[in-house]
Amino acid sequence: GTKLAHHHHSGAVTASVEPVKEVSVDSLTGPAEGTPDVLYTLTAEKKTVKLASGRTVEAWTYNGQIPGPELRFHKGQLVEVKLINKDITEGVTLHWHGLDVPNAEDGVAGATQNAVMPGETYTYRFVAEQVGSFWYHSHQDSKEAVAKGLFGSLVAEPEEGMPQDVKDITVITHIWEGGGVAIGDNDGIQQMKIAPGTPVRLRLTNTDDWVRQSYKLLGTKFKVAAIDGTELHEPGDLTNVSLDLTTGGRYDVTFIMPDSPVTLNVGQGGKLGIVMSPNGQGELPEQVPNLPVFDPTHYGTPASAPFDANSHFDREFTMVLDNQLGFFNGKLAMNYTINGKVFPDTPMFMVREGELVKTTIVNRGAVDHPMHLHGHHMLVLSRNGEAVTGSPWWSDTLDTAPGEVYEVAFIADNPGLWMDHCHNLAHAAAGMTMHLMYE
Ligand code: C2O
Ligand code: CU
């Protein structure tokens, strides 16, 4: 119906041939009518969970497990997810990290909905418009909720599904303070048998709060096929690079299984990861210390994008990230600031539907800030004054290290009130949060 078409991003573009419309409440919600193609129920509940280390922890879970169940659907499908809060007294929501859903389905407590309290339910409905690797998590006191386990992976497959022959492996890494990790469906070292010649896709997803996690794939050449759920154009072969993934970010890595073992090492200790071998045996690839870190700036080959660094921008914003001691909630503490202010005093960025928006992100602070914009994907134009010359590089969670300057741009094609915050969730809670708002 017309309602549905209005939510397609392409719908927003074709809307220019129609008379200009005011943003209506309709355009902010998912389709109310229609039988869902995919239906999930997630129940948030407290549960004692055993970690890889053997230690048991009091976790907050979706359906009793960490990570929560993997949700999969195809592009174009109508997805319905029913959230039930059994006993999380602090309240829960579901936010679809990286999936650009209509605003009312975005799951941000205090902005797009109220937190769902014990005994309450909430139903999310949206049409999947993207293909790629995403994740979901609660967005009510995210700092505590994510650290305690309220997250899971979200995979949007192509319309026709994933090719049958691809071995498709989600690797979620999440370190519980003091030890214990969830990786994929298992903990610690996972063993897998994969026949030589099999195309493999690893969906690396870092759900940690503050750690930039490093992944080392040894024993094969490979490609970084996608960043933050968006495919790269003609990515080249890589060997011996460390894939350092910011918290909240995703890398999809592909390779053809060779006839000898391949290992994915996660973190530094060598105690975490996956061993993939053709027959459960064979010599493991040698560890290589101090690998250079993968940098997407000049990776892949250029391709046309809807705009580039030379486009005319309707709005230009600057976002200066910093930290300084100050008063926060009446106490002297480290404040994490955007343009000198802590949330809710951070200025909003106001845009109109259809505008092309450029943002310069300057990290003047002492630590990394992975900046996450809801509801939109940012095209990275330059990093530290160097233009991106490889494949178009779209990001929803962009790591900025101290001293770095990024120029990014996005099309304002998804009306509503959107969060833009550091995905080091402790920083977000200590002020580094702002809103993008449609006039
Ligand atoms: Cu993954 Cu506002 O969050
Ligand atoms: Cu930060």
Image (cartoon, rainbow, N blue to C red):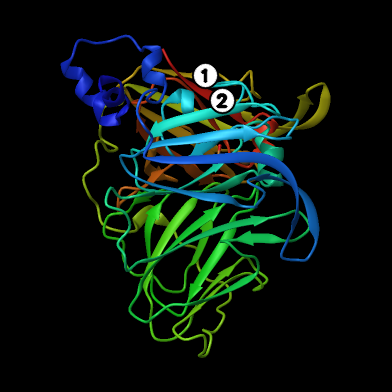
- Most extreme residue toward the bottom is 282
Q: Residue at x 39, y 80 (%)?
A: 195
Image coords of residue 355 (percent x, y): 31, 22
Residue indicated by mark 1:
348
Q: Amino acid at mark 2?
A: Met
Secondary element under disc 1, as helix, strand or loop, is loop
- From the viewer's perspective, tell me whether residue 14 is left or right of residue 322: left
335 or 103: nearer the viewer: 103
Q: Quadrant of the N terminus?
A: top left
Q: Residue at x 52, y 54 (%)?
A: 205
Total labels: the figure holds 2
302 or 420: nearer the viewer: 420
The mark that comes first in sequence, 1 or 2, is: 1
Q: Is residue 386 visible?
A: no
Q: Is residue 68 visible?
A: yes
Proximity of marks 1 and 2: CB atoms separated by less than 8 Å: yes
Image coords of residue 83 (percent x, y): 57, 34
Q: Which mark is residue 92?
A: none
Are there few (<14), some (14-19), or many (20+) residues within 10 Å of tag 2?
many
- Check the image and report above or below for 364 versus 4: below
Are there few (<14), some (14-19), or many (20+) residues within 10 Å of tag 1?
some
To which quarter of the image does residue 412 belong?
top left
Q: Residue at x 26, y 57 (%)?
A: 301
- Check the image and report above or below for 418 versus 369: above
* Alpha-carbon span between mark 1 and mark 2: 6 Å
User: Mark 1 vs ligand 1: CB under 8 Å?
Assistant: no
Image coords of residue 377 (percent x, y): 39, 37
- Most extreme residue toward the front is 35
Secondary element under disc 2, as helix, strand or loop, is strand
To which quarter of the image does residue 26 belong?
top left
Q: Which mark is residue 434?
A: 2
Q: Amino acid at mark 1?
A: Met
